[in-house]
Structures are given as structure tokens and as C-alpha cells.
Image (tube, rainbow, N blue to C red):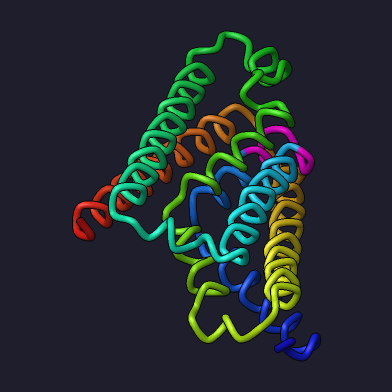
Amino acid sequence: MQAPIQSVLLTGFLLGWSVAWPPGPINAEIARRCLARGFWAGFSLLLGACSGDALWAVVVSLGMGVVLTGTTIRFVMGITSIVLLLALAGVFFKGAWTSLRAKDPAAAEAAPARFDSRRAGFLLGAGMALTSPWNVAFWLAAIGRPEMARYGLGSLLLMAAAVLAGALIWGILWSAFVTLVRRSGGGRLWDIAVKGLTGLLMLYFAVASWIDLVSAS
């Protein structure tokens, strides 16, 4: 059975928008990169995250989502995600400390670190999306429900594409907004504050993920 295309597209778009806008590690890192290097720095991470989500969408649409519900694999993914968040927190705290101690703030801001390159941003976004148990839970809830089984594969993939479109449009608007904020002001203290606060956010998400992981096991 094929669902009406308009209904599939609208439902998917609204799902993608609603799942993308709440504060989270990906939105926080997009903001940090846009503030540090401009729109395209954050947009590259957004594309990576959407690519990771696209892979999960295809896996669930093909009926392989049941493999992801096992306790062991969810625990391994949860630990991997937490380690990644802690590593990011460490990188940002180190960056804030380096900026704080820099004798020449202009030189410290001029040369982009390899970690902040667009390629690194894409890979980081994909890694964050692929290792997040919450992302898997979302895709299972969105298109892996038993009642969705009556729809054909084409409808499921179309809904997944609409979800990604909603998330991508939100990400573009968010990146553009943060870039405008960046252009309105800057300076050394701004750079230190952004890196330090992003580090704290990643640390918070890591702790919250650990609590959820322990409570679920």
C-alpha cells in the first residue's frame, strides 16, 4: 500500500523540523563553528549529520531496524557517543584555554585548526549522527513502527527524505542566524566564551547520555 504523497511529505517534513530544532550537541557544534569560521564551517557539519541520518533512515526502511534494538549494540553505541562527546568537550576546553593564553589574539584566530576544517566538520557530523542511540530511537519511532509496514518501501524512503529536508532547512536557518550574530560582533573574549560554553554543553550532554544509558540497562 502506497500512502498519499502529500501526506507522506508533510508528515516527514514536520518530523524533521521538530527533531532538529531542540538544543543538542549537533546544534551546539554548528553554532560554534559558524561563530568561529562562518556559515560554511557549520553547514559542512550539518551535511555530515544529515548523511548519517540518511543512512539510518535507509537501514530502518529496509526493515533492519530490529537489529538496532538489542541491548548490547545500544550500549556500545551509547558508550561510543559518550566518548565522542567527552572528546569534543576536551577539544573545546583546550581551545578556550589556548585563546585565553594567546599573546597575539589575531594570530590565534587567523589559522583554522585541522579539526575545524570543512572535511573534518562533515566527518564529525556524520559520526555524531551515526553513534547517537537517540537518533536510532527517532528513526525507529518515525518509520519503523509496525503500522508503517503497510506502506511500500517507496513511501518509507520518501518520508525519510522529507524528514531530512526538514532537518536540513532548519540547519540552514540556524547556521545563517548564528553567522549574522557573528558578524555583529567578535573579539577574543567572544572566542573564549563560545569555546568554553560549547565544551560545557558537550560535557552536559555526555553526562545526560550516561544517566539515560545506565537507567535503561
Residue ID at (57%, 81%):
149
Residue ID at (28%, 54%):
71
Which of these two is toward me, 80 or 204? 80
Q: x and y percent of residue 195 in the render? A: 51, 33
Q: Is residue 166 above or below residue 148?
A: above
Occupied quadrant, residue 70:
bottom left
Occupied quadrant, residue 58:
bottom right
Q: Is residue 9 above or below residue 34?
A: below
* Left or right for 90, reference 122: left
The quadrant of the picture occupied by the C terminus is bottom left
Residue furthest to the top: 103
* Left or right for 46, reference 100: right
* Left or right for 161, reference 204: right
Which of these two is toward me, 186 or 213? 213
Residue ID at (61%, 64%):
62
Occupied quadrant, residue 124:
top right
Q: Is residue 137 magenta?
A: no
Q: How many marks?
A: 0
Q: x and y percent of residue 145 in the render? A: 49, 78
Q: Is residue 39 magenta?
A: yes
The quadrant of the picture occupied by the N terminus is bottom right
Which of these two is toward me, 58 or 159? 58
- The span picked out in magenta is 33-40
Chief secondary structure of the magenta portion: helix
Q: x and y percent of residue 163 in the render? A: 68, 69
Q: x and y percent of residue 99 in the render? A: 54, 20
